[in-house]
Image (cartoon, helix red, strand yellow):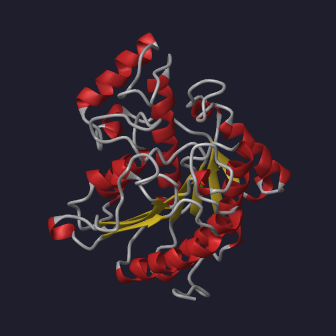
Amino acid sequence: MSNPAPVVVVAGEAIARYGFGEGHPFGPDRHDHFLRELHNQGLAGQVVLRAPRAALTDELLAFHTPAHLERVRRRSASGEGYLDGGDTPAFPGVFEAASAVVGATLVAVEALMDGECRRAFVPIAGLHHAGRDHAAGFCAFNDCGVAVEILRARHGLRRIAYVDIDAHHGDGVYYAFQDDAELIIADLHEDGRFLYPGTGTRAETGRGAAAGTKLNLPLPPGARDEQFHAAWAEVEAFLERHPSEFILFQCGADSLAGDPITHLELTEAAHRHAASRLCEIAAAQGHGRVLGMGGGGYDRRNLARAWTGVVRAFVDSPADGASATIGG
């Protein structure tokens, strides 16, 4: 397109339904808190809103095992029990809602790969705990992992960067690709000695031929923006050493001060800064493509401000690499 929209935001009732009931930290109201803030800040008129779609079975199977899909289908039909050992409750229609989350991420992928935009954002997405064969940590399916596999199979990309600033380590992504030298991972999170899932130490840098292609940066409980920026500088240097063709950005807002289940004390300025810098890095590396995924965040005011901060950074970033620099 001659005048590509700067940002696509994928939102709608289909992904809003992915939540575990009123009163649960991951409730279905999270989506609307973000949308209201998007309108309140005047951003809704500066983006293109796109509707989600359900992921196809073969798209889900690009990352997940058939047995896992069948397990979620069964629990979805009954609406009873848990999808995992006790963190992720089943509810009627959870299969369809989780499929819509994956499909929404793929709508954003297609918009980026088709040249409709250079940045895209999906609020209810970034379900980074689910593994190839299991649910975990409020995550039935892993849209991040599906996106990686679809970018490779459908679009021929090889070197993809996954950047995660959610308070929780993105273990479902890390362990699925720890042997994969072409998925670059930079994951900045609360130290696993103090928070679920207890993984993501600095020593976890990839395995075998992939050693050195993963960067895990645990932060201590109570870490503030100053410590985030020091760690973020390391992320930027790492991404410069490992250039990519596409950046997936899991920007969970549970790293902000006041989140009810985590212990970091960042502000939304950290998310805005990370988003802005990733746009510059992507432009400098010649592709410009950044896909933001909302991830965690259980204080509604925090998630609304952090996610709209990301969208603001996307809107304000240059559409090409003309003024982009790395390490600035």
Residue 204 as seen in the image, left or right of residue 320: left
Residue nearer the viewer, 268 or 55: 268
Q: Check the image and name the residue furthest to the top.
A: 78
Q: Position of residue 264 (x, y in %)?
A: 59, 58
Q: Nearer the viewer, residue 274 or 16?
A: 274
Location of residue 269 (image quadrant)? bottom right
**Residue 244 relative to residue 288: left or right:** left
> In this rendering, is residue 134 above or below 282?
above
* Residue drawn at (27%, 51%) of the image: 176
Q: For the point 36% across and 46% down, which residue is it?
A: 146
Q: Give the number of marks.
A: 0
The residue nearer to you, when weighing 177 against 255, is 255
Q: Quadrant of residue 27?
A: top right
Report if residue 2 is visible in the image. Answer: no
**Residue depicted at x 43% and y 45%:** 143
Quarter of the image for the N terminus: give it: bottom right
Left-right relation of 17 to 242: right
Q: Position of residue 81 (x, y in %)?
A: 42, 16
Q: Position of residue 321 (x, y in %)?
A: 56, 83
The residue lying toward the viewer, choosing from 106 and 91, is: 91
Q: Give the quadrant of the C terminus.
A: bottom right
Up the image or down, 80 lies above or below 19; here it is above
* Residue name at image x 16 percent, y 69 percent: 209
| Residue 144 percent location from the top left of the image | 42, 50
Q: Is residue 168 visible?
A: yes
Q: In the figure, residue 300 lies in which quadrant? A: top right
